[in-house]
Amino acid sequence: MPRRCLALALLLLAACGEPERATPARPVADAASWMNPFGAALRTPWTETDASRTAAATARAIDTAQQQFDDGLFDQARASIDALLGSGSGHPQVLFLAARLRVQAGAPAEALPWCERAIAAAPRWPPPRVLLAQCYLALERPAAAQSVFADFEQVAPWSPWGAYGQAAIAMRRGLPAMAQEHVARALAIDGRLTPALQLAAALTRLRNDAAGEEALLLRLVEVDPEHAPAAARLGALAAAGGRTADARRWLERAWDLSTDTSIAEQLAELARRRGDSADERRWMTAAGLRAP
């Protein structure tokens, strides 16, 4: 859904408030309404109201601020968000952008209250909680970050982000068994969540399970074909298993996605093993090394 439509939909949803209690259905007035119960509504023309015009203008302003942020025009985005806040907007996307701008400026502590306000406005929306946890990690408060994801898992058990976040923080705290438990739950909810697949592969690598790691990495590159580290690791695993053709294919793919000189070094080593001195020189030059 385009950002403009999403912003407008969320704005209108927030403006609706609590739904009214259902009233007993009235008897059908005539045969025409029985055949087409929406006939009367269709005969009534829709008229634009001040509220709808305001909602549309706010959605356009939010869309502009988001685009400015995405384009790296942070000063302009900050001015747009300040204007929206000054007009009294409490839209969750506005509050979230206010938090992101403070993180971008290197002030994660200042972003905390804005994240919390965005969460209060949209409790089941993952991005503000993820950013809040990242701020806590930047402030060296891993327990607070883990609590954020645990709370989110209770609020939105259908989302994989709560379980994944707990897994990532457990991994950071040196608790791989706990990380494995959480990441398994995340992938059970969404088996295509890229960071969860990456973390699961890393955990499998710690257990020296090359086959299990390769299976997870293959799932990862299927979901994200431009994931260079996964392609490079698949190349390394293939090389370690003696599958030089597969190794060359994966490493060349990784090189196309990311000019990491370590990838070129591995390709030079593969060329040396198969006795291709010209290819070895080419890759050593790409790696910034002196060719033999």
Image (cartoon, rainbow, N blue to C red):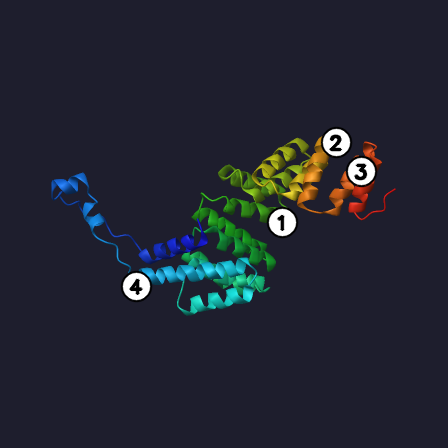
Q: Secondary structure at mark 3?
A: helix
Inter-mark Cα distance, 3 to 1: 40 Å
State the image coordinates of residue 12 (x, y, percent, origin top left): 35, 56
Q: Which residue is mark 4?
A: 50
Quadrant occupied by the C terminus: top right
Q: Earlier in the sequence, mark 1 or mark 4?
A: 4
Q: Residues within 10 Å of mark 4 (few under 14, many from 20)?
A: few
Q: Quadrant of residue 274?
A: top right
Q: Earlier in the sequence, mark 3 or mark 1?
A: 1
Q: Which residue is mark 2?
A: 244
Q: Earlier in the sequence, mark 1 or mark 2?
A: 1
Inter-mark Cα distance, 3 to 2: 14 Å
Inter-mark Cα distance, 1 to 2: 34 Å
Q: Amino acid at mark 1?
A: Arg
Q: Amino acid at mark 2?
A: Thr
Q: Which residue is mark 3?
A: 279
Q: Earlier in the sequence, mark 2 or mark 4?
A: 4
